[in-house]
Amino acid sequence: MNVLTAELIGTALLVLLGNGVVASCCLKDTKSGPAGWMVIATAWAFAVYVGVVVAGPISGAHLNPAVTLGLAIKGATPWSMVPTYIGAQFIGAIIGAFLVWLFFIDHFAVTLDEDAKRACFCTYPAIRNYPINFLNELIGTFVLVFVIFYISGGSLTLPGEASATPVGLGSVGALPVAILVWAIGLSLGATTGYAINPARDLGPRFVLSLLPLRTDPDWAYSWVPVLGPLAGGALAAWLYNALA
């Protein structure tokens, strides 16, 4: 498995499980019903864990263009690899979103609420205020990328081992990153739905626009969860380099 395949599969799993929990909680006649924000934020964190475990040993498990951009600015990822990473992430997100629709196809058919169906693919704000929504996504992604830099640079000593093991962005670092995403979701996610990942939002939004769901993909808002996270990732890299 190469970098492109790892990022594609990891991102597809991330979106399938992450948007899958939203579908479970928002669509009509599922067994989970309106389980609420805690369930959604927790499952999204676990979705990140799964994606990082699978992709980590091969690609470092960026799974997010904002992370890839931040790592490139930081100097940890060659700029020549950035198109490969981001292209794979968008393709993976599209595949994951399509699988969510296929998995929940009967429940989409009986759900009339457009917001509920849209939420299974992409984000939209609780209160539409584009400058503040942009700032929300920037800050949330800044926290994500800035802390990931410290996770990836850290190490720990495993039981029975004499020397420390680098955490990295591989399987060892999967749990800390999942906890980080969980914290962001619970603390900073309720205003915009914390996309904090352009591929996770734009790819599924594109899928939504092609599916026969008669649901507006809300393209007017789509720039916020793309540019906000990219700005947050870039700012995190700039500050990390300035403090190093």
Image (tube, grey):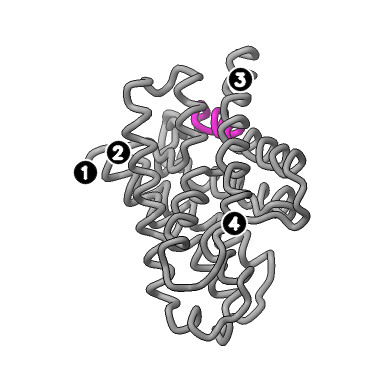
Q: Secondary structure at mark 3?
A: helix
Q: Position of residue 227 (x, y in %)?
A: 58, 36
What is the three-letter code of the residue carrying label 1?
A: Met
Q: Which numbered disc, 4 or 3, marks the residue that appears first in the sequence? A: 4
| Location of mark 4 (residue) | 218
Q: Secondary structure at mark 2?
A: helix
Q: Main secondary structure of the magenta part?
A: helix
Nearer to us of marks 2 and 4 is 4
* Quarter in which the N terminus is drawn: top left
* Mark-to-mark CA distance, 3 and 1: 31 Å
* Mark-to-mark CA distance, 3 and 2: 25 Å
What is the three-letter code of the residue carrying label 2?
A: Ile
| Location of mark 2 (residue) | 58
| Location of mark 3 (residue) | 240
Q: Residue 22 in magenta?
A: no
Q: Residue furthest left?
A: 1
Residues 131 and 96: in front is 131
Mark on residue 1?
A: 1
* Quarter in which the C terminus is drawn: top right
